[in-house]
Image: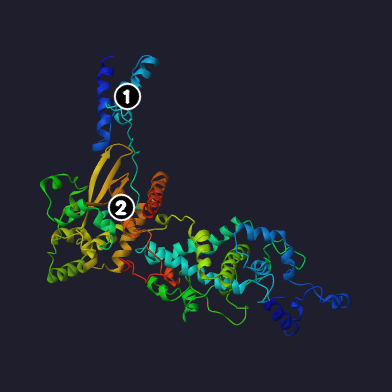
Amino acid sequence: MPEWMRGARSNANGSLIDQSHESPEESSTPHQTDSSQRSLPSPHPDRSLRSAKLAALRARLSLSSKIPLQVLARALVDPSADAHPRFNNANLAFVGASLLQYHTSEWLVTRYPRLPMGILFAAMKGYAGEPALDRIARAWGVEAAAAPGEEVDPGYLQFSPDKPTVMMHKWGYARAEAKELTKYKWRRGMSSRVVFDDPFGKTIPEQTEELEVSDARNIREMIVPDTEKNAHANLVRAVIGAIYLHCGSETAKTFIKSYVLSRELDLSNLFNFKLPQRELTRLCARENFEPPVARLLSETGRLSRTPVFVVGIYSGHDMLGEAAGASLDAAKISACINALKAWYLYSPGDVGLPSDTLAEDATPWRPVYVDIGEIIS
Amino acid sequence: METRQALRPLSSLAHATSSVTRTPVFRSVASRRHQSTTSRTKKMLKIPPHPDFLIPRSGQNHIIYNPPPSAPSVFHTPFKFLPKSDPRRQANLIQLLRSSSGSHTSRGSTALPPPSRTVETRQKKYNVTREQVEEMRQLRASNPVTWSVIKLAEKFDCSPLFVMICCKASPEHKDNERQRLEAIKARWGTIRTKARDERKKRKVLLFRGAL
């Protein structure tokens, strides 16, 4: 019997009586005598060795045999199904989420060193956020159990949608003024989100002692809005955590790279500009370029109902961006937007990552180019 | 028949030039319609292939590069936007020499397309003094109706935006202006209201880069 299971048994005798995950052979006599004993909230860890679904999942993900099937089964149990921390995936998911966010952020910053903070947060959410992880878990072919319980096959994802679960894996720096932010609609600038808040730039609601808060908005923020998505995302995080614990950081990094960072996210669609012309002028002034001038590259049908103008933005003799539009103004604005996107989406290509230097025979880290900051904020 | 013969060399010429100079190709729609039979119309519309697709005189195989006209990708960073440390900067020697030489040759300056508007190339004047700004504020405060933003901009030879930065109208004047605008909007019919609404939606799309 593994170490963690024995620990669970001794703990089960103490405070949590209803959580007694004892192996069937040993507890056969009390089962027969004590008919009033309640069934377990999640399947017994021993049953995972005989589950075809779990073995198939492990093979499908090409996981190493170093990861026990019991751990993989544990990654499939959401805290809403089994509240006992030794039998649900909360701890594994916590480890996995921190690894995932670290690798995603370092990859984004080194690959796109000029992304503004707001876009970086959105990209983080696009790669490592709950919706993306939910899609990944569904692509793995994991099915949800109709209801969690002892009799369910351990290969099913177990969560109960009717039980209110608290957001488990949000952390970062909670603000002291978190209550006032929502209550009085205080301003929350972009630069403060670098330090405070969670990795996706969202505030962390202040943790209260009990769930029965009078303010309805507070409850809504603390309870998971979509239990199914949250459970699927936690599964991915927990699998990453399990790989890190049993196979090491290099394997976890490879896993993250091949399952999360290999997905395609169109970063150029995340932008929403307010004053593109002014932003481009400020950029050119900051970088000592000549001020941008809109020049007409070609046009057709100026006096017709559907004219087309192709406008290029020039700084000196270099064209920065070009776009077509139905009016001179619209073409100029979209050309400015294209020029700004070309600036922000600059990529130095495949430079190394800081985590590469964690390997044993790694060359020392050479600093990479990272932009000095926002143009207008 | 004569139109067809006149059209033939024009269309072949348009092919050869369009990819280089980007001039829009006008083809007379009127002449296309008045072909009396189907076969003549079809014959007239038969266009020779682009010269790139023909086998060259030497008869050798060659690579055809004829991309469709499309907007350039934003992931292609212009040379000017490459940081100093980027290896692509050193690799592109021609651009590097061009940018380092500063003042350009006569060929380079003539190659620039015209500005889309005349205001694009105007220099900033910074001609309004501190005293003039004070005077501007006094005039605006004394009678905001006669001394409108446009009038003040004309008087002090600056842009309306600068006047609006300097002066702040009184709340009563703002309220009057808003009421006047509301009255104008109330007179709009359904067509104009809808058109204005759609213009707003288009603007949102434009700034998102989705138009």
Disc 1 crowd rating (10 Å Cα; few below 14, some 14-19, many 20+) is: few
User: Residue A52's spot in the image, x, y percent?
Assistant: 72, 59
- Which of the two residues, A140 or A230, is positioned nearer the viewer here? A140
The chain letter under disc 2 is A
Say which element carries label 2: helix
Residue B68 in the figure: left or right of residue A171 = left
- Amino acid at dot 2: Ile
Residue B145 in the figure: left or right of residue A219 = left
Residue B94 higher or lower than A114, as above or below: above
Say which element carries label 1: loop
- Residue lying furthest bottom in this view? A14
**Same-chain status of marks 2 and 1:** no
How many numbered tags mark residues here?
Answer: 2
- Amino acid at dot 1: Pro
Residue A196's quadrant in the figure?
bottom left
Residue at mark 2 to residue at mark 1: CA–CA distance: 39 Å
Taking the image as drawn, is residue A187 in sight?
no
- Which of the two residues, B180 or A362, is positioned nearer the viewer here? A362
Residue B58 higher or lower than A163, as above or below: above
User: Residue B38's spot in the image, x, y percent?
Assistant: 40, 16
Q: Residue at x 46, y 75 (%)?
A: A181
Which numbered marker is on residue B48? 1
Residue B133 higher or lower than B38, as above or below: below
User: Residue A189's spot in the image, x, y percent?
Assistant: 39, 72
The chain letter under disc 1 is B
- Which of the two residues, A282 or B123, is positioned nearer the viewer here? A282
Q: Which residue is mark 2?
A: A333
Residue A18's quadrant in the figure?
bottom right
